[in-house]
């Protein structure tokens, strides 16, 4: 781990104004297994404490799925104990390596109903102490989420390689070229004029059923990355929407995978992934 308390303090002095830390459980056995890294949970707890010691706002991002939802109530308490300002109960979104692991991660409908109950109760009980956001899995939703507030409308992300992206997962859409901060163009020019940011901005790019939908300027067709991952065309309706011809198939797929006995993870690496075996948790 490269982050130290001194480096975090230097980042705060340089203008860092908020820290968000993702947790995969409330204790090491589950959290380190999901993360694929030994002692990851312990280090995250340490960084969370540094964050509050430096008086920086802290968000705990609880990445939830079938194999850790039983710990949700304890994760809520962990966020309180860490003096977090906000807790995001974020069910896994199935892009990239999460998509490869979907069968091992997909929660059951009963789990989602119990999750909703826990979140609703905690939101009332902890009002004024901990703000709680809740993200339902797209596969069980009726309407798609307004991903990143709409493509190229409110947000951009700069990748470690310097690429300016409309969302964190945008590079998963093959065929799009993203400008770099190292190019001859300013960030303002990239935001306003680059082909990638304008490709799915607004509503002019939409096909049916999005084009004539009354919600087209509310959800902007849902997630472009998910549409690409599941249909092969980022311009299609996000299958999370009930108007998508793939929605029913998606829901049935979720039910089947949630009921499966597949619990083994495929850990990310440059060789195409390592299947979890025995005590090998990808660490």
Image: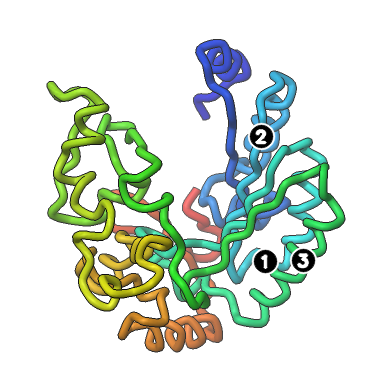
Q: Quadrant of residue 263?
A: bottom right
The residue that mark 2 highlights is 58
Marks 2 and 3 sit apart, C-alpha to C-alpha, by 21 Å
Residue at point 57% right, 24% down? 17
Residue at point 69% right, 19% down? 54
Residue 111: x and y in percent read 67, 76
Residue 177: x and y in percent read 14, 44
Marks 1 and 2 sit apart, C-alpha to C-alpha, by 22 Å
Q: Earlier in the sequence, mark 2 or mark 3?
A: 2
Q: Are marks 3 and 1 in contact (CB under 8 Å)?
A: no
Q: Earlier in the sequence, mark 1 or mark 2?
A: 2
Which type of secondary structure does the marked residue at label 1 adopt? helix
- 66 or 2: nearer the viewer: 66
Residue 205: x and y in percent read 19, 61
Using the image, tell me which numbered label, if any, was put on residue 176. Answer: none
Closer to the eye: label 1 or 2: 2
Q: Are marks 2 and 3 in contact (CB under 8 Å)?
A: no
Judged left or right of residue 267, residue 181 is left
Picture layout, residue 162 above or below residue 70 = above
Can residue 275 be seen by looking at this rendering? no
Which type of secondary structure does the marked residue at label 3 adopt? helix
Residue at point 64% right, 40% down? 59
Marks 3 and 1 sit apart, C-alpha to C-alpha, by 10 Å
Can residue 183 be seen by looking at this rendering? yes
Residue at point 58% right, 45% down? 22
Q: Are marks 1 and 2 in contact (CB under 8 Å)?
A: no
The residue that mark 1 highlights is 69
Using the image, tell me which numbered label, if any, was put on residue 118. Answer: 3
Identify the coloring.
rainbow
């Amino acid at each position: 781990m490269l982050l130290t308390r001194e480096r975090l303090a230097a980042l705060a002095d340089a203008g860092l104004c908020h820290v968000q830390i993702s947790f995969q459980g409330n204790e090491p056995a589950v959290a380190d297994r999901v993360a694929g890294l030994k002692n990851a949970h312990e280090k995250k707890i340490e960084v969370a404490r540094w964050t509050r010691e430096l008086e920086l706002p802290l968000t705990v991002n609880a990445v939830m799925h079938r194999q850790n939802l039983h710990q949700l109530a304890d994760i809520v308490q962990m966020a309180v104990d860490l003096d977090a300002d906000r807790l995001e109960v974020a069910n896994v979104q199935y892009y990239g390596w999460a998509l490869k692991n979907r069968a091992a991660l997909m929660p059951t409908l009963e789990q989602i109903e119990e999750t909703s109950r826990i979140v609703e109760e905690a939101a009332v009980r902890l009002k004024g102490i901990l703000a709680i956001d809740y993200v339902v899995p797209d596969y069980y939703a009726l309407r798609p989420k307004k991903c990143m507030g709409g493509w190229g409308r409110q947000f951009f992300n700069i990748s470690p390689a310097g690429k300016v992206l409309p969302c964190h997962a945008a590079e998963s859409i093959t065929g799009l070229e993203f400008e770099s901060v190292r190019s001859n163009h300013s960030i303002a020019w990239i935001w306003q004029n680059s082909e990638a940011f304008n490709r799915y901005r607004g509503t002019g790019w939409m096909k049916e059923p999005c084009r004539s939908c009354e919600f087209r300027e509310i959800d902007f067709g849902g997630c472009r990355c998910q549409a690409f991952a599941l249909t092969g065309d980022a311009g299609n309706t996000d299958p999370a929407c009930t108007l998508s011809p793939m929605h029913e198939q998606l829901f049935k797929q979720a039910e089947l995978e949630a009921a499966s006995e597949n619990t083994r993870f495929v850990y990310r690496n440059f060789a195409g992934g390592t299947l979890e075996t025995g005590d090998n948790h990808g660490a």
